[in-house]
Amino acid sequence: MPSLFRVSLASVVACAVLLPATGSAQTTLPAPADKILTPVERKDGYLTDTQGGVVRAIGAGVCVRTSQWTPALAVLECDPDLIPKPAPKPAPKPAPKPEAKPEAKPAPKPKPEKPELMNIERKIELQGMPFDKAEMTPDNVKELDEFLADLKPVTLGAVIVTGHTDRIGSLRYNQRLSERRAVVVKDYVVSKGIDPKLIFWEGKAFKQPIPVTKFCSNKMKRKQLIECLAPNRRVTVEAVGTQPKPPAKKPAAKPEAGDKPEAKPAAKPQTEKPEAKP
């Protein structure tokens, strides 16, 4: 019996201690009845009143925590420092700069049209060289200069120089003489600016005579025969290459149908002469 009394008394004392504290505690306003509490808004870690408001300690104004409280159960109204702050909104991306338009490239210049080429073949025979000599006469030099001047616009492919002799003398001697004559002319052509790599030379002795010299008879006197055979003592120069074609000539414009030739003035009538009186 004494022990049972002690237990009941202890219970009465505990109730007496809690009742003043509960009655004197400040409570927060209850949440609206139509508001549904989300898990974040639950207050399991705090002492709440019958209306769901968190009980605050008298004087201190702090929320009364339960033994179940952990930082994970903190609520904003009681422990705002423990509530993770929302991540700051990312700064708005700057408006993209308008892309700079590439500068317009100038139109490519049209390639110049290549001129149409035509083949060129030129030939000259430097006749009348001195008898038994490998040298040119003044007339030979003049003719060759004019020939080379005419070749300036030509893109040369080859220049062929061939020496010749008359039929007086042996073949062996005349072969060497014809070669010496070819070399003399070849050297002169090179001195005028022709590429020596384009020049080919040879001697033919008297194997290619001028047709008209067939009438030169060996019965002639020697001086007369030498003069008759002068055309055979020569050097032939041939040039081959290419040259731009000249522009085609435009046809003359035909007169239009409306353009009539000017009318010639009418001839004046002739006055009759008076008849002669008898």
Image: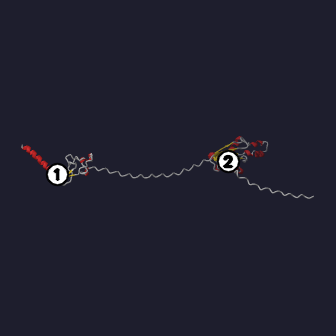
Specify the amino acid type for callout 2: Val
The N terminus: image quadrant: top left
| Mark identifier at residue 23 | 1
- Identify the element where label 1 is drawn: helix
Which residue is the extreme one toward the front? 34
268 shown above or below 236: below
The spot of residue 83 in percent (x, y) is: 26, 50
Residue 221: which quarter of the image? Answer: top right
* Residue on which the image places disc 2: 185
Q: Residue at x 8, y 43 (%)?
A: 4
Contact between marks 1 and 2 (CB within 8 A): the answer is no
The spot of residue 31 in percent (x, y) is: 25, 49
- Identify the element where label 2 is drawn: helix
CA separation, marks 1 and 2? 143 Å
Number of marks present in the image shown: 2
The answer to which of marks 1 and 2 sits earlier in the sequence is 1
- For the residue pair 234 and 117, the one nearer the viewer reads as 117
Q: Residue at x 13, y 50 (%)?
A: 17
- For the residue pair 175 and 99, the one nearer the viewer reads as 99
For discs 1 and 2, the disc positioned in front in the rendered view? 1
Q: Is 161 situated left or right of 53 in this image?
A: right
Specify the amino acid type for callout 1: Gly
The spot of residue 248 in percent (x, y) is: 66, 48
Mark 1, other Cα within 10 Å: few <14 / some 14–19 / many ≥20: few
Which residue is the extreme one toward the left? 2
